[in-house]
Amino acid sequence: MTDPLQIVCPHCDAVNRVPAARLADHPTCGACHRPLFTAEPVALDEPRFRKHLRASSIPLLVDFWASWCGPCRAMSPAFAAAAPTLEPQVRLVKVSTEEAPTLAQELSIQSIPTLAVFRQGREVARQAGAIPTSRILDWTRQALG
């Protein structure tokens, strides 16, 4: 039997232990009792992003964006449409580079939108530019092998 996965609640950021075989059973947070998966991207500020990155057992697909960026706004619905397909194996996250400039600089985000896949706290793939839902899905799956 595999060890339980650590899943960070998208609502209260509590770390929950969920058996991998139970991910598809719509688990809820032990602290706030809300769903651990919402089939939509989770907007995170820098401290919350760092917690999800550090504590999550599942990969994170992150959309680094800014409110003034036209291509970012154009890709947002495509990114959101990928969430129901990729969850619960992947957590989709949105991080505003305007609200987290230190993080964007630390991660060398040089253009937006930029998608990045993180597994076990490490970046494993990066894609700059707006892409449609089908390419988001294919690229993410390829990045995670």
Image: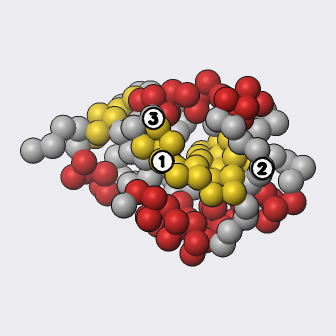
Identity of the residue drawn at 76% across and 44% down: 110
Position in image of residue 126 (x %, y %): 59, 52
Q: Residues within 10 Å of mark 1 (few under 14, many from 20)?
A: few
Q: CA distance from mark 1 to mark 3?
A: 9 Å
Q: Residues within 10 Å of mark 3 (few under 14, many from 20)?
A: some
Q: Amino acid at mark 1?
A: Val
Mark carried by residue 124:
1
Q: Looking at the image, is 101 positioned above or below residue 137? A: above
The residue lying toward the viewer, choosing from 65 and 26, is 65
Q: Are marks 2 and 1 in contact (CB under 8 Å)?
A: no
Q: Earlier in the sequence, mark 2 or mark 1?
A: 2
Q: Amino acid at mark 2?
A: Ser
Q: CA distance from mark 2 to mark 1?
A: 18 Å
Residue pictured at 34% horizontal, 46% vertical: 27
Query: Please, what secondary structure does the residue beneath circle 3 have?
Result: loop
Badge 3 is on which residue? 121
Task: For residue 7, say whether it is visible.
Answer: no
Q: Position of residue 140 (x, y in %)?
A: 49, 61
